[in-house]
Image (cartoon, rainbow, N blue to C red):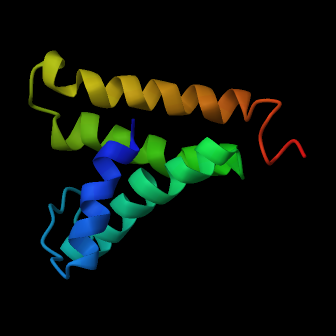
């Protein structure tokens, strides 16, 4: 599900459009790169089960920023999806990959 949010950002980067929000003050381009890593590359690693616990960390951090900084003033219904993703990736960090992952081989 996270790939649906990361793939448009990846396409934006490939097309050369570096305009992006800057919620934590790093600059638009570095924030876009970090968002692509957290929302596109790390979910792919989680899907195949490679370095699963490590790959869940950037995505959880990104969802925390989305929930508490980007949507901090919004009502709960707006930040609900980010909080659900955050809780899901925290669970993945704690439990690790399943028995069919690359990490288990």
Q: Please state if 61 lies on the left or on the right of 17 as rendered.
A: right
Q: Give above or below for 86 relative to 77.
A: below
Q: Please state if 81 lies on the left or on the right of 95 as rendered.
A: left
Between 2 and 80, which is closer to the camera in this rendering? 2
Residue 83 lies in what quarter of the image? Answer: top left
The residue located at (31%, 74%) in the rendering is: 30
Q: Position of residue 63 (x, y in %)?
A: 36, 40
Q: Give above or below for 103 relative to 37.
A: above
The residue located at (17%, 17%) in the rendering is: 76
Q: Quadrant of the N terminus?
A: top left
Between 95 and 67, which is closer to the camera in this rendering? 95
Instruction: Work out which residue is located at the far left of the displayed protein and give it.
Output: 74
Instruction: Work out which residue is located at the far bottom of the displayed protein and give it.
Output: 16
The residue located at (38%, 23%) in the rendering is: 84
Label tally = 0
Q: Give above or below for 11 relative to 18.
A: above
The residue located at (59%, 25%) in the rendering is: 91
Q: Position of residue 79 (x, y in %)?
A: 21, 27
Instruction: Work out which residue is located at the far top of the displayed protein and give it.
Output: 77
Between 8 and 42, which is closer to the camera in this rendering? 8
Residue 66 lies in what quarter of the image? Answer: top left
Between 85 and 49, which is closer to the camera in this rendering? 49
Residue 98 in view here: yes
């Amino acid at each position: 599900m996270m790939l649906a949010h990361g793939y448009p950002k990846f396409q934006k980067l490939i097309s050369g459009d570096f305009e992006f929000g800057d919620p934590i003050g790093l600059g638009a381009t570095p924030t876009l790169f970090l968002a692509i890593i957290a929302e596109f590359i790390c979910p792919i690693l989680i899907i195949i089960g490679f370095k699963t616990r490590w790959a869940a960390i950037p995505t959880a951090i990104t969802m925390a920023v989305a929930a508490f900084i980007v949507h901090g003033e919004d009502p709960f219904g707006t930040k609900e999806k980010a909080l659900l993703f955050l809780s899901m990736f925290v669970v993945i960090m704690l439990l690790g990959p399943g028995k069919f992952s690359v990490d288990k081989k």
